[in-house]
Image: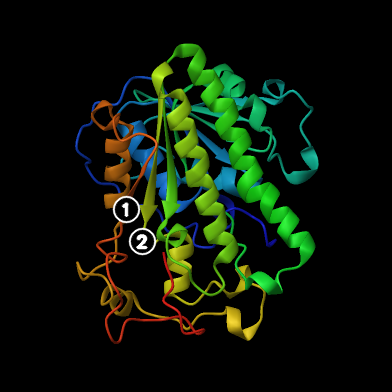
């Protein structure tokens, strides 16, 4: 596992699947929803909810492992996915401007799947950001009408401890790639004069913590990009919003709770947190519990809806009040002595 793999593709608990729930019906305009970081726990949960609501979905991935996780999680008969046959229209190397690299197990190939009586979904590699709208249209009939952005890396270390080459890679993977995707997708939305883009951020963007400087900087940069896009494009029908998440028992949050995130850090003692239980972490949240995956998905469904259009060029926080005040005595802290953000 490499240092810079995305959360959507390197999450070790791929066998744990999101819980399917009946989300409130929201007035989401018809059209394809593009999910960046689609093989992450939250990306899969959002994909399932959107498919169940009848929206075609395109989920991005970085490698064959992520593709397999998506196909397994969205298989017919899984919770929230109707039973029935699956029609694979096959691997589609013709959807790419460059010939696919078959040495990586087919990560550059597109998969288009349709469940009987259900909305179709496509699995797309994310690296060719500029062609994402065209590939989405080729696979599902139209360019994206909505976008959910879950992409983030796991590069976490003290600012002064990072290797210069890792910093360069981080900037490319966690900032430049997001900017390229947002640029390409928003331009396609401008052509239709309609679009909604939601960035899944973190309370780390607002609260400093030892070892989270690069992660927080990437989240802050993402918020700045989405905020500016909403400011510049809203008059032409394209709006944006960022959702800051606190503690969620999913993805990197789940790894931290279980003390399993050391492989994603620099391996030095000061960078590895002390494992905490969900109960201990919940003691630091005013609501007394962590944010659930269902709450995240429900909030995102609302943010994609027409009722949330005026939540534009801004951010909202979903953390149970975790960042509203100073930590109480006994609140779990990292091994470095600083309260860690979600």
Determine the secondary structure under disc 2: loop
Q: Which residue is mark 2?
A: 246
**Residue 341 coordinates in the image, percent (x, y):** 42, 67
147 or 259, nearer to the observer: 147
For the question of whether residue 38 can be seen, the reply is: no
Rendered-image quadrant of the N terminus: bottom right
Residue 113, image x and y in percent?
50, 28
- For residue 235, side relative to residue 181 (left or right): left
Separation (CA) of disc 2 from disc 1: 8 Å
Which mark is nearer the camera, 2 or 1? 1
The correct choice, above or below, for 94 with respect to 342 in the image is above
Q: To which quarter of the image does residue 162 belong? A: bottom right
Q: Is residue 19 above or below residue 29?
A: below
- Which quadrant would the C terminus be assigned to in this image? bottom left
Residue lying farthest top? Answer: 192
Residue located 42% across and 60% down the image: 206
SS for tag 1? strand
Q: Position of residue 332 (x, y in %)?
A: 36, 81
The residue shown at (47%, 72%) is 256
Badge 2 crowding class, 10 Å Cα cut-off, few under 14, some 14 to 19, many 20 or more, is many
**Residue pointed to by mark 1:** 317
* Image coords of residue 258 (percent x, y): 44, 75
Q: How many marks?
A: 2
Along the polypeptide, which appears first: circle 2 or circle 1? 2
Query: What label sits on residue 25 in the rendered view?
Result: none
Kindly tell me whether residue 12 is visible in this rendering: yes
Question: Counting other residues with Cα less than 10 Å from the Cα at mark 1, is it few (<14), some (14-19), or many (20 or more)?
Answer: some
Visual colour scheme: rainbow
Residue drawn at 53 percent across, 48 percent down: 69
Q: Residue visible at 29% across and 26% down?
A: 28
Whether residues under marks 2 and 1 lie with C-beta atoms below 8 angstroms apart, the answer is: yes
């Amino acid at each position: 596992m490499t240092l810079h793999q995305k959360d959507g593709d390197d999450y070790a608990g791929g066998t744990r699947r999101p819980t399917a729930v009946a989300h409130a019906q929201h007035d989401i305009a018809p059209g394809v929803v593009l999910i960046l970081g689609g093989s992450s726990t939250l990306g899969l949960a959002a994909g399932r909810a959107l498919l169940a609501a009848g929206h075609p979905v395109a989920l991005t991935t970085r490698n064959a492992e992520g593709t397999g996780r998506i196909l397994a999680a969205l298989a017919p008969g899984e919770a929230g996915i109707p039973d029935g046959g699956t029609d694979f229209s096959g691997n589609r190397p013709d959807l790419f401007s460059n010939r696919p690299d078959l040495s990586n197990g087919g990560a550059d190939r597109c998969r288009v799947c349709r469940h009987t009586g259900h909305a179709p979904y496509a699995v797309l590699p994310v690296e060719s950001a500029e062609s994402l709208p065209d590939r989405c249209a080729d696979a599902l009939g139209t360019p994206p009408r909505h976008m959910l952005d879950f992409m983030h890396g796991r590069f976490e270390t003290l600012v002064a401890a990072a290797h210069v080459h890792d910093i360069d890679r981080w900037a490319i993977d966690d900032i430049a790639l997001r900017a390229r995707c947002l640029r390409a997708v928003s331009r396609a939305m401008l052509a239709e004069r309609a679009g909604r883009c939601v960035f899944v951020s973190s309370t780390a963007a607002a609260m400093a913590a030892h070892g989270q400087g690069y992660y927080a900087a990437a989240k802050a940069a993402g918020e700045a990009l989405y905020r500016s896009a909403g400011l510049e494009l809203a008059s032409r029908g394209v709006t944006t919003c960022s959702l800051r998440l606190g503690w969620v028992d999913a993805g990197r949050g789940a790894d931290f709770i279980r003390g399993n995130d050391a492989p994603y850090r620099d391996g030095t003692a000061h960078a590895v947190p002390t494992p905490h239980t969900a109960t201990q972490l919940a003691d630091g949240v005013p609501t007394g519990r962590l944010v659930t995956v269902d709450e995240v998905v429900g909030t995102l469904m609302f943010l994609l809806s027409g009722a949330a259009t005026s939540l534009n060029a801004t951010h909202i926080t979903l953390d149970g009040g975790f960042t509203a005040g100073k930590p109480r005595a006994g609140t779990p802290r990292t091994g470095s002595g600083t309260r860690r953000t979600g």
